Image (cartoon, helix red, strand yellow):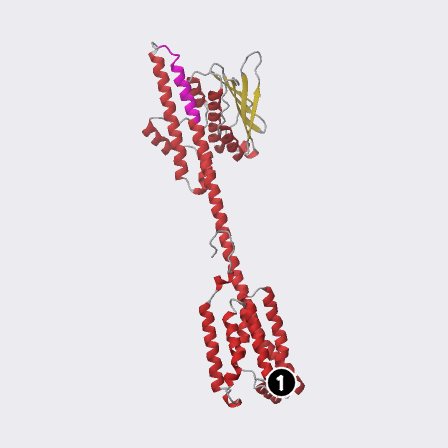
Amino acid sequence: MSERAGEPEPFPWRGRWGWRSDVTAVVLFLAVVVLSHEFLFMARVSGSYLGDTAYFVLAGAAAIGCARVLPGVALTLIWVGTLLQMLSGFDVDMSQLAVLYVVGMVARYGNRLWVFMAGLSIAVGSVLGTFYIARVGSWVSVPLFAAMESNAWPVNNQLIAIFVVVTAVMTLPWLLGLLVRLFAGKQTAERGSAQAREEADNALELVRLRTENAALARDVHDVVGHSLAVIIAQADSIRFIPDTDVLRIRETTGTIADAARRSLGEVRQVLSQTAEAPPAARLAASFSAPPTAQSTALQTAQLGLVLPDASQLSAILHNVRGAGYAVSEETLGDPVPLPAELVPATRRIIQEMLANALHHGCPSTPIYVQHYWGATSYTLSVTNYFDAAQDTGRSGTGIVGMRQRLASLTGTLSIDTEDGTAGAPDRFTIAATFPITTEWMRS
């Protein structure tokens, strides 16, 4: 294996080095050749038969040993050993098993070039083998010729019969090697496909988790940002209350405590929805899941509060008014009930819009909230005044979060500024538009 990641393997064939099976094949080959020479062919030869044939037997053994790792070398060794055997005039024997083994292994492990060369070797070897068997009067042709004579076949078809038999015997292992190669390739492709699917699932899971985290952060940002803006504005207003007006001071501090409890309750609600919902439903829950009676009762018992009705925005506007701001609300057009998936979104968006107005607006100027119900859309807008010279220019994630929330509902967010004249503060308007679908109107 390469020491540095990303570098290719210097010897890729080592991954398929089955040396145990190669050694076993060589030992079996030598055993079969020795035993066959001792018991089958001793009567047909004189002298040391094994000694005379050792060179092409060893060539066949070497070819078997490297056929898996180096198919090209193995095929070359087979040709060298076979040609030496033919030049020496030795008859066909069990050493030809090496030819069949190597042809099959080349078809299994060789590249396309060597697979083609193995097929070409079968064609050329079949022709040479046919004429060689006929010339030396090999024992292989004896039973074949006897069968032809007993069936009254024409003698001139003997070469054709030898050629057919030799070709069939040599082609069979080559085809088997190709079949095993195709089967192994199919298994590799299936494993690669399974791995690709697993990686895709992991990537989708990562995207889902990041989306959920972004939705959670967006919800917490909207809730906490709005509540802190209200709390800060109310806390600042205490400085302008006379010390003798104890009742008003108590009311303001009570409003601050209620806003803090409400903010804590909404944060707990968002976190509980994310933790308890199934993975596939967590993202949808951050947008569309209304508070259940059980969660509301639990938060009421623990925090001493009642969450505001999600279908109404009056509680949110009441908190801003309690901070000393003049908030006017206007409705244009004929309102229709909001679908369930838009209720939490409108609440979060109006919270963020008002939080921006409290952060950047002038305290002495009013805030305008407008609901415009058109034929194909519903627009919620907030307008406030701000002093560009005193604005710190700090940019947060509120507007980005609103755009993302609206994009998930096929809505849009627009921002418009109008410069003030004669020393008047500038005017800032932010509007969220939700499309009204036919299904929504019917429901």
For image coordinates 35% across by 22% down, the residue present is 257
Residue sitting nearer the eye, 372 or 152: 152
In front here: 308 or 365? 365
Residue 377 vertical position relative to residue 362 in the rendered view, above or below? below
> Which amino acid, mark 1?
Ala
Give the percent coordinates (x, y) of residue 86: 59, 81
User: Is 234 a magenta residue?
Assistant: yes
Q: Residues within 10 Å of mark 1 (few under 14, many from 20)?
A: some
User: Which quarter of the picture shows residue 375?
Assistant: top right
Residue placed most toward the observer, 73 or 208: 73
Q: Is residue 159 visible?
A: yes
Count all numbered tags in the image, as a single digit.
Answer: 1
Range of the magenta residues?
225-242
Q: Which residue is mark 1?
A: 134
Residue 281 coordinates in the image, percent (x, y): 45, 40
Residue extending farthest left: 301
Against 49, residue 221 (above or below) is above
Q: Quadrant of residue 278?
A: top left
What's the residue at 47%, 34% (across, down)?
287
Give x and y (percent) for residue 197.
Answer: 50, 51
Q: Main secondary structure of the magenta part?
A: helix
Q: Residue at x 46, y 44 (%)?
A: 205
Q: With respect to residue 308, does 421 lie above or below?
A: above
Residue 40 locus on image (x, y percent) = 49, 86
Position of 226 with respect to 375 (left or right) is: left
The local secondary structure at tag 1 comes to: helix
Magenta stretch: includes residue 112: no
